[in-house]
Image (cartoon, grey):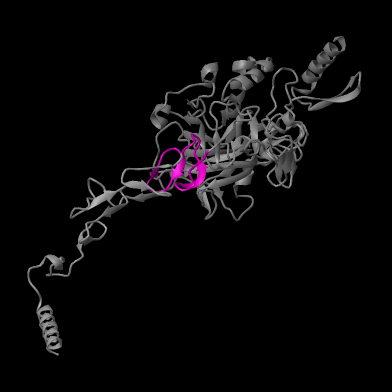
Amino acid sequence: MHLQAVFLLLLRCLASTLGQYDLCKSLVSTDEGSVWEHYACQPSPASMKDYMRIKVDPPGITCGNPPERFCTLENPYLCSDECDASNPDLAHPPQLMQDRERNGLITYWQTVTWSRHPEPLLANITMSWNKSLELTDDIQIAFEYGRPTVMVLDKSMDHGRSWQPYQFYADDCLDAFNMQPKRVRDLSPANLTRVICTEEYSRWVGSKNDKHVKFETRARFAVFAGFRLQNMDNLYTRMESMKGLRDFFTFTNLRLRLLRPALGGTYVQRDNLLKYFYAISNIEVPARCKCNLHASQCLLIDGNLQCQCEHNTTGQDCQRCKKGFKAKSWKAGSYLPPPTGSPNTCTIAGSPSGSNCECNGHSNRCSYIDYLNIVTCVSCKHNTRGQNCQHCRLGYFRNASAELDDENVCIECNCNQLGSVHDRCNNTGFCQCKDGATGAKCDDCVPGFYWKQGCYPNVCDEEMLLCLNGGTCYLNQKCVCPPEYKGVLCQESRCEAGKDCNGASSPHLSTATLLLCTLLTYLLATLTHH
């Protein structure tokens, strides 16, 4: 216990020297020998402008094609400056927002002037990294020739498929966005992740006095960590316990929407629109790779940032378990307990133990499927199926009164083969019935049908399908007709049209019968004389 206390003290000293959560593992001596001890870890902060890809739109928003003159707000009538994309000394392409300025020479990207006023001068600057990142300090954008009077900073967490506002900027928030102006330092722990509109970076103070626009990350950290960020343990604890806090500082893409340029503290002067434009010399994005606390290094590989994953994890963000380890055991690392956190290491797959297989007691065998990167149970018993034997086989349904690991968790559907479409049922045990069949097992008929190796529509009944001409209905299956009638409902006479069916009861003899009788009488008389 004494050695363990000394070890933890050394770890605290090391953390304060290197920075918190910089180590993923260390070799520790125990009674059984040296073993690796694993900790939650994260990469060091870096300047992400070195890795960002910049795109500006709409097309043609960058000045210089065709060449045009422009002037500054301080010297609005000295329009001798020129932007010309074909001349390297006069061009202002987007890549100048992220270059390393040397020898004190400021380079910047610049838009066309507001020559089409009153049509809005709109420009979007999209920054992408193809990687999840976490802010570690203030985002800073340096504007030359004045900061925009209206602007929005957006962020995306899904590589630009969807966007959400990060912060609004305006010289008049109520007029521009119908929002009350706020300052970050006025936020409290309860509303720290609120998207606000600030007027601090949009009002005219002269283009050379203050040209930076910030997204204040440090001030938000200070709400939990103190003014000088000396209590980072408290911040990291809140990262774990406060819903949405960690995600608030996470992004894959950023976007600046420039909605109205600097006006010099006055209204738009339509007689000189060449002094209105946007110009950005630098964008700083201090952040670290998001590795889910499973990596201490993040390297540029094949043009993309990639976490160097530990704890048996893999993926660009260490977001899944490595091959041969249980996919369901993946979990992001945790900052708690400080100072080393919890690594939440992926556990090895394929163990013969049923509990390790996570098959709910219905199998003790697992198999790793490479192309899906999952571990699945094999030969589930007790009529179960699924990756963890958590579903019932076809033809069975879940016993609501039994636990998932109960041998009787699945009950046979017992659908009537003659009345049901198939032998499967829903999760309450009801089978899918054929037309006319009803009941939980499809072993009965709905009104208007009768059962005979299945349900068939009634031939007759005592209400709608009445047997005619004195016929009687037998078990709804057929009409029993009088001798002189036939048909399904005894609706057809057996006699020919216009003739009597009962010849024996007729008082009239036909002509043929009379002739026959006369002939027979004559023959008898002749035989008698001879």
Magenta stretch: residue 183 in it?
A: no
Question: Which stretch did the figure color magenta?
Answer: 413-440
Among all residues in the image, which is located at the extreme front? 530
Among all residues in the image, which is located at the extreme bottom? 530
Of 277 and 28, the residue lying toward us: 28
Residue at 35% across / 47% down in the picture?
450
Whether residue 184 appears in this view of the structure is: yes
Residue 12 on image: x %, y % = 79, 16
User: How many marks on residues?
Assistant: 0
Position above or below: 272 against 404 = below
Among all residues in the image, which is located at the extreme left? 508
Residue 7 on image: x %, y % = 84, 15
Position above or below: 204 against 188 = below
Of 261 and 169, the residue lying toward us: 169
Whether residue 107 appears in this view of the structure is: no
Instruction: Locate the C terminus and report the quarter of the image it occupies.
Output: bottom left
Of 483 and 39, the residue lying toward us: 483
User: Where is residue 322, by image quadrant?
Assistant: top right
Instruction: Locate the N terminus and report the quarter of the image it occupies.
Output: top right
Magenta stretch, main secondary structure class: loop
Residue 231 on image: x %, y % = 68, 14
Would you say 287 lies left or right of 79 here? right
Residue at 47% across / 45% down in the picture?
274
Would you say 318 lies left or right of 411 here? right
Residue 42 on image: x %, y % = 73, 29
Of 394 and 335, the residue lying toward us: 394
Would you say 302 lies left or right of 243 here? right
Magenta stretch: residue 435 in it?
A: yes
